[in-house]
Amino acid sequence: MTSWLRIAVAAAIAFASVFFASRPAHAFPWMIREGYTGCNTCHADPSGAGILTQYGRGMEEVVLRMPYKKDADPGKMGNFLFGAVDLPEQLLLQTDFRNLFMTILPNGGAAQFQDILMQLDQSAQLKVGRFRVNGSIGYAPPTANINSNFTFRGGGFGATLTGAPSDAGAIVARQYWLGFDIGKDEEFLLRIGRMNVPYGIRSIEHPFLVRSVTRTDTNTSQQHGLTLSYSGEKFRGEVMAILGNYAIHGQAPAGQPQTFATYDSPHERGASAFFEWMPSNKVAVGASGLATYANLARTDLDPSLNSDQLGRYAFALHGRIAPVKSVVILAEADALVNSQPFTQDCPTCQSHANNHFGMAGLLQVDLEPYQGIHIMATGEVFNGHIHETNNPTYDTTTVVGWIGAWWFFAPHFDFRVDAVYSSGSAPGASPTAQGTSLLAQIHGYL
């Protein structure tokens, strides 16, 4: 069988598996404990997350999951379909399933239960010479309220190809891009398409405040645009020209015709950049910046905004350090500004600004007492200050604490439990009930 025929057969098998099989969006910043400061050796995305390379699959078997025998050879178990199909080196395939069951114990209220299908995706990359074609496709089921205390739902709005999930659910495409490797050692990668926004510590964990309020998570916050990344021994970075998230669009008011202006109104345009310096293979420090503008603010994401133009700015410093192999410390601090025209029934007031200032912070300690078992403690804080011209100001503070355990118990499978306390929701962050939540998550991939 020729290599091209093998590629076609393997691609057909993978396409079928999304409908007949049960991403990881693997992005484990604590892999720095193993001396991996960069991401491009294990991921097709040079900034981490998404489909794993063949080397990344091997490393997952050797250094990530719990070992049951002393054998450093990953064999074929980490390969696609557990090694049942030998893929040509030009092709990467990955099928992912991730499910979360959450119990919410609000202060003074009845317990709420949610079963959330977080991910059912098929990812692929074909690399011919220096050219790459990369993408994912998946399914997001509809929301169903079984009773007053139980809800089943699936994530995906913001990454859908078919609009908001309906009674039949929706088809989801989180990423799709064309790329070209540049440089003697292919240390640069130029991409165009829908991609993760380069900013801050990239992680697949339940949306942290720093990922929610900056809209830079790897679930549904991707943007269409153009990126250029660099991956070196002591330095890595990526810059992105943001053109907007075209999985969403504006809607004209009832009775009025849809125009390009209303369709285009919520699309953010601007730039984002991420840089990280690695003075040693156990220390990494970085900085990020983001600036975008849209004609219509996403009030569905941040109800504190008004339906007007929005300038959104974020700046971050972060660090990753492994003082000893069993311990990794992650930290990030963000400064945020949302700026809108001050709307009032007087023409002279339009020149004033309605500024939302915020600070967000994350500190996580990851302890790995034995390979494949992680104990994590995380603290988060958000403080927002809104200044409206000629109106009173107010402050809001949200504090979140996490304690959890993560078990990589078998090839291609991991299980996680968390207890989370939140003082409430932060403007722009994923909705969080005040009180305690208990989470159980299972993830598997082919």
Image (cartoon, rainbow, N blue to C red):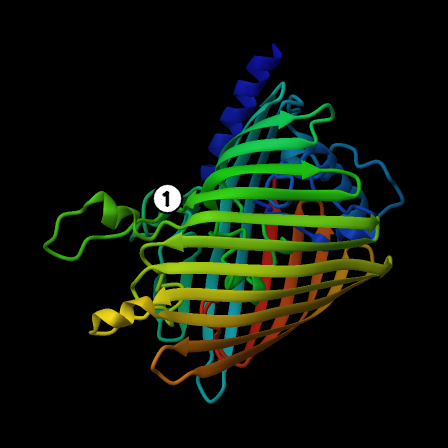
Task: Estimate the x, y position of residue 148 in percent, counting from the top left.
Answer: 35, 75
Task: Estimate the x, y position of residue 378 in percent, counting from the top left.
Answer: 68, 70
Specify the farthest residue to the bottom. Answer: 108
Question: Compared to 248, does 350 lie above or below?
Answer: below
Residue 23 occupies which quadrant of the picture?
Answer: top right
- Quarter of the image with the C terminus in it: top right
Specify the farthest residue to the left. Answer: 255
Task: Work out whether residue 67 can be spotted.
Answer: no
Q: Residue visible at 54% across and 49% down? A: 272
Q: Residue visible at 50% across and 50% down? A: 119
Task: Estimate the x, y position of residue 132 in percent, counting from the top left.
Answer: 57, 26
At label 1, the amino acid type is Tyr
- Relative to the observer, which residue lies in front, 261 or 105? 261
- Relative to the observer, which residue lies in front, 228 or 419? 228
Question: Compared to 297, does 184 lie above or below?
Answer: above
Specify the farthest residue to the top. Answer: 2
Per the image, the residue denoted by label 1 is 246
Question: Compared to 435, does 282 lie above or below?
Answer: above
Relative horizontal placement of residue 350, taking residue 400 as reference (left or right) = left
- Quarter of the image with the N terminus in it: top right
Count of all numbered marks drawn on residues in the image = 1
- Relative to the observer, which residue lies in front, 135 or 214? 214
Task: Work out whether residue 190 can be spotted.
Answer: yes
Relative horizontal placement of residue 106, taking residue 229 as reference (left or right) = left
* Element carrying mark 1: loop
Q: Residue visible at 69% across and 69% down? A: 363
- Relative to the observer, which residue lies in front, 430 or 22? 430
Question: Compared to 131, does 283 lie above or below?
Answer: below
Q: Is disc 1 surrounded by few (<14), some (14 to 19) or many (20+) residues within 10 Å?
A: some
Task: Estimate the x, y position of residue 418 in percent, counting from the top left.
Answer: 63, 69
